[in-house]
Amino acid sequence: MKVAMFTDTFLPNKDGVVTSICNHVKGLKKRNIDVVIFAPGEKTKLDEYFGARVYYIKGLEFKKYPGYKIVLPTKFISRINAFLEIEEPDIYHIHSPFSLGIAGMLFSSKFKKPIVGTFHTYLEDYIGYLFNGNESREFYATKKILGMTSWNYFRFIFNKCSFVISPTNEIAKVLRKKGFKNIVVVPSAVDFDYLDKQKKINIRKKHKIPKGYKIILYVGRLGFEKKLNVLLDAFKMLNGKNYLLIVGKGPFEKKYKDYVRKNKIKNVKFVGYVKDEELSSYYRSCDLFVSPSDTETQGLTLVEAMHFGKPVIGANRLGVKEVIADYKNGLKFEPNNSLDLKEKIEKLLNDKKLYKKISKNAKECSKKYSIENSTNKLMKVYKKSKYEKLEIKDIKRKLSKRFKSILNFV
């Protein structure tokens, strides 16, 4: 079997979608499944990741979300076609409903191959980028209108797939209510072996954190949708000796740093980008991991922290509702409620008995997200997938109409 994956984000970008793809590639290659990846790049070239061939297609910078590129399939249709004729994949897997995801869908029809799609991102919550994070009256009006339009578009794209993969049961419930068909749950995987093999660094010493201070950790993209201001407000209200480490970079980094300065929040360190081989040391060194985002379809960093026996706290919405089991592997707080988050942090840091119990359970809870378990489920989806004839002319006509209706707002 050979699988062709189509994605609108890949290395060197780092996010949940990229991590999910990379870890599934590792799992598939261990089963001798050949994988080819089509992704946007600075220029069109052939690369390699863990034995998978990566065809980077030159894309245009997406100014509203720095670091991401958009490929216009019509400009590179002949090249993509040539690559696919050489590779002859048996199954197509799209990881985005836009750009290269559309190309994957059209070519699966041309070459009469089955196609599956993964719903990674709750895009409705990313509309804030059109307003630079300012939640004005216009923002909420646009979110309502564009939200309805985008869901119609996503449903149209994904319902052309043999199966729609959801990373959690919570997201699957949302998709079913939105009219998506043939949904299966396949969690995004975490490479625990790779994390365990990373070198150990004394994070407390590296960042000069005083002895006796509790370390609260956040790892992720510094974007509008991650709601770091909620965590910063909660941290400011905490009593006792605490230190907040923020690992990652992103388009809202400067705004978050300005927020810290403006509100005079002490003991906050923006670590920036961390090399992969150093990341596990941050998890090992922290006392508590917090993810304030309420847009996660799963939350891979929560799982990574749990693997190291760290209690986790996350917003009680979407995928996080499923990943975190209250009083078992962590605690959930009311989304956007800094006071509630502050109380949950203090609950874990001050209740030693509860902290010990949750720490013990966290690692065990993370095991269900291993590469082996996730890839087993993915293989079952691939084997059940069948080619269903799609009318390319009808698809192109409807795509043009629906895609334009979305772009009119952007």
Image: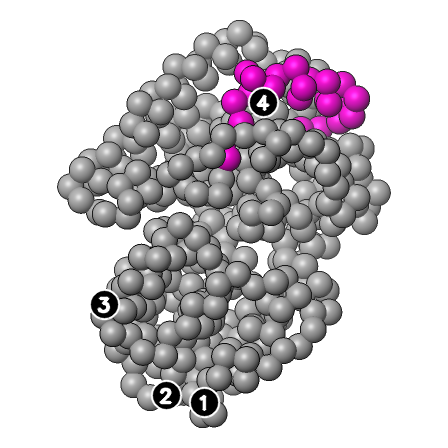
The residue indicated by pointer 2 is 241
Please, is residue 187 above or below residue 60 in the view? Answer: below
Query: With respect to residue 365, does 46 lie above or below?
Result: above
Marks 1 and 2 sit apart, C-alpha to C-alpha, by: 9 Å
For badge 2, the amino acid type reads Lys
Cα distance in 3D space between marks 4 and 3 = 46 Å
Label 2 near label 1: C-beta < 8 Å? yes
For the residues labelled 1 and 3, the Cα–Cα distance comes to: 24 Å
Q: Give the residue pinned by disc 4.
A: 103
Q: How many marks?
A: 4
Which of disc 3 and disc 1 is earlier in sequence?
1
Q: Residue at x 44, y 53 (%)?
A: 250
Which residue is labeled 3 in the image?
A: 262
Structural distance between the alpha carbons of marks 1 and 4: 53 Å
Q: Can residue 157 be seen from the camera position used here?
A: yes
The magenta stretch spans residue 87:
yes
Q: Nearer the viewer, mark 1 or mark 2?
A: 1
